Amino acid sequence: MEEEVADFFWQVTDYRVEGRCLHELSDIIWLVLCGLLADCEDFEQIYDYA
């Protein structure tokens, strides 16, 4: 199932400027999802969790 979810994230269009981003958008989405499932309430907590 994890591969299916990761494949879905790769389909999301990334409008950020190429070459200026350190992380793949799919990785960011995956970390936010995991953080929310771990009961993080804001991006600071998600950052700490990641």
Image: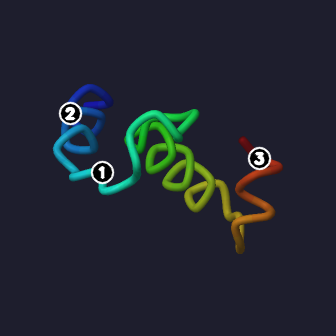
Marking on residue 7: 2
Marking on residue 27: none
Quadrant in the rendering for residue 32: bottom right
Three-letter amino acid code at the position of disc 3:
Tyr
- Tell me residue 44's x, y (percent): 79, 64
For the C terminus, which image quadrant? top right
Residue annotated with mark 3: 49
- Tell me residue 13's x, y (percent): 22, 52
Residue annotated with mark 1: 14
Q: Residue at x 79, y 61 (%)?
A: 45
Count the labels in the image. 3
Looking at marks 1 and 3 on the same chain, the residue that comes earlier in the sequence is marked by 1
- Tell me residue 35's x, y (percent): 62, 54
Three-letter amino acid code at the position of disc 1:
Asp
Looking at marks 1 and 2 on the same chain, the residue that comes earlier in the sequence is marked by 2
Looking at the image, the residue that sits furthest to the bottom is 41
Task: Look at the picture and state if 9 lies above or below 16.
Answer: above
Front-lying residue, 37 or 24: 24
Give the CA separation, mark 1 to mark 2.
Answer: 14 Å
For the N terminus, which image quadrant? top left
Instruction: Tell me the element at label 2.
Output: helix
Give the CA separation, mark 1 to mark 3.
Answer: 24 Å
